[in-house]
Amino acid sequence: MGTIIKKKIKGINYYYYVESKRIDGKSKYVNQKYLGSADKILKMVNESGKSLQDQVLYAHEVTFGSVALLYDIAMRLDIVSIIDEVVPKRNQGASVGMYILTAAINRAVSPASTNGLKEWYEKTSLPHMTGLKSTLFTPQNFWNNTDITVEQLRTIEDRIFQKSIRTFDINTGDLIYDATNFFTYIDTMNPSGLAKRGHDKAKRNDLETVGLALLVTPDFSVPVLSETYPGNRGDSTQFSDMMEQLKLRYRAIVGKDAQITIVFDRGNNSESNLDLLESEGLGFHYVGGLKKNQVTELFAVSKSNYKPLSCPEDAPEKYKSLTTYRMRATVLGREATTVIVYNPELEKGQLQGIQINIEKTKSELLEIQGKLLKRSKGELKKGKEPTFESVSKAVSKILDHREYMDDIFEYEILEKDNHIFLTFSDSEDKLNVIREEQLGKTALFTDRSDMSDYEIISAYRSAWHVESSFKQMKDTGFLTVRPIFHWTDQRIAVHIFVCVLAYRLCGLLRKELHRKGIECSINQYLKSMNSINRVTTFYGDIKKPKKVEAFISGDELSSRIEESYKLQEKYYC
């Protein structure tokens, strides 16, 4: 049985709970626990009557799940060490690698400018995980520590690529190429070499634009190499520059020449680009798309001559309805293997769009026809008197505005009694010719005659991965590149490198999750993991509060990911 005893130490009474036991005939304390002073015991008694809710003072919540997931894969890839080896600094504060990684994680989960990096950082679990204070991540500190040259960025990317190949078994036999651009808010008079007025793909031709060329893997869109380039440089010019870079950098990474098939869309078709790919200096293979005017004889083949596509057993269902026709043809000044693919679902969608456009075109032509009739009857007198030339110009503008309308519609402009009239009709026969010769068809070509129709088609279709990469980088929620406010080429290059690094980590994570049997998009798993936050609840005495730490439970997806990686156990236990 226990009792409470008093001990007087330096004139102050302290109380203990003790349990006694007789040992060898003598009473000895076998259990003793300090209770405190009389005041403390009284306070404990008073508080014991309060509910836990009444004792709560405040809570502090920090983001955990998404940042821990990205931090974890970055540590396994030695991202920080790789960067620090290329760009070392004095051994104090955050390293260059940690600045870059922190910015990349921020860019992935909650994009903020460098002005908002410090505030975001302190609201995450990163201070606990890295041991670095948020005061280090001011804009001035960030840019003072990331004065990195383009050559250093390329070296860093190459080493990360090399590490990724070993760690994630990346197949570099097929790579997909494309380029896009991002508008900036740089002043027009700024002497930037990267930010230039060009054909901006977001239609912001009023702003300076920066280009980004990417090579990604067909599976999970993992960036292999990237290159930032002036926004006024043409796609074809950048294509040749990127291929030269790929050859040199790939050889340095793997120690041998590349045996690579480059997949690209129709926008990169040119004789000079193909000459480059086929040259002894590069020797790359390729699969690309063709426009109708580049291989008219292939489109002229009747669909009755097409054969069902031979697919492997594990081929996606969407391939099994395709039919193809294969032939050797002259393409951009060379003999190549060409395949035309007919997809009935594609034709169905295209035909639906054409029918909608036919109705819109009819409506606009009827409006012109009606106004001309009213003017001939004297019911409409305002405006300029229509002429044969002005009506012809207006009709041509309407028909040219939408694809195929100029082929489908027939019209005649008549002049009678000093008045202009318009008659028109749409031709079902002409629409049927378009359906037979063009709709549902995609023409492809390659220098690899050893590839089957299925391999050519699946290789080309994988090109959507790079398009999805660009779409993701223009997303406003996660991984966005825009807006770019930086005003020097060096800062622009670092900013885009950080964005590509963020996307690279996310792509590798998606590949790894797939291996674990977890199928989801980047946005899905980032959003889901954002729900697992760390909450510290403080209660008791405001001057010396106690605390309880816990994690907010996630949804089914985040729970599966957490169970797979054991992030809570790894970084908090």
Image (cartoon, grey):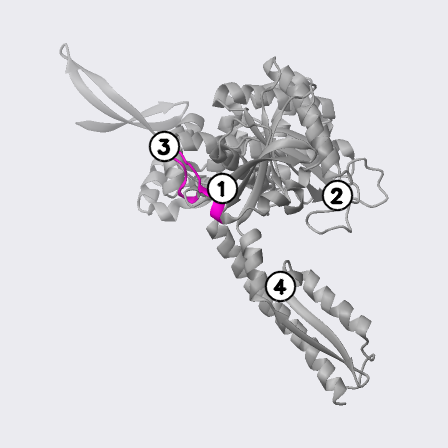
Residue 122 in view = no
Q: Quadrant of residue 222?
A: top right
**Mark 4 to mark 2 CA distance (whole Å):** 38 Å
> Disc 1 or disc 3, which is closer to the eye?
1
Can you tell which of label 3 and label 2 is closer to the viewer? 2
The residue that disc 4 covers is 408
Residue that label 3 marks? 563
Residue ID at (13%, 11%)? 25
Quarter of image, res 494: top right
- Judging depth in this view, the residue of 399 and 133 nearest the camera is 399
N-terminal-most mark, 1 or 2: 2
Q: Indicate which disc residue 324 carries.
A: 1
Would you say the magenta stretch is mainly helix, strand or loop?
Answer: loop
Circle 2 is placed at which residue position? 209
Question: Tag 1's secondary structure?
Answer: strand
Gap between marks 3 and 4, in whole Å?
A: 59 Å
Bounds of the magenta span?
304-318
Q: Where is residue 355? Give x, y as percent.
A: 55, 64
Q: Amino acid at mark 4?
A: Ile
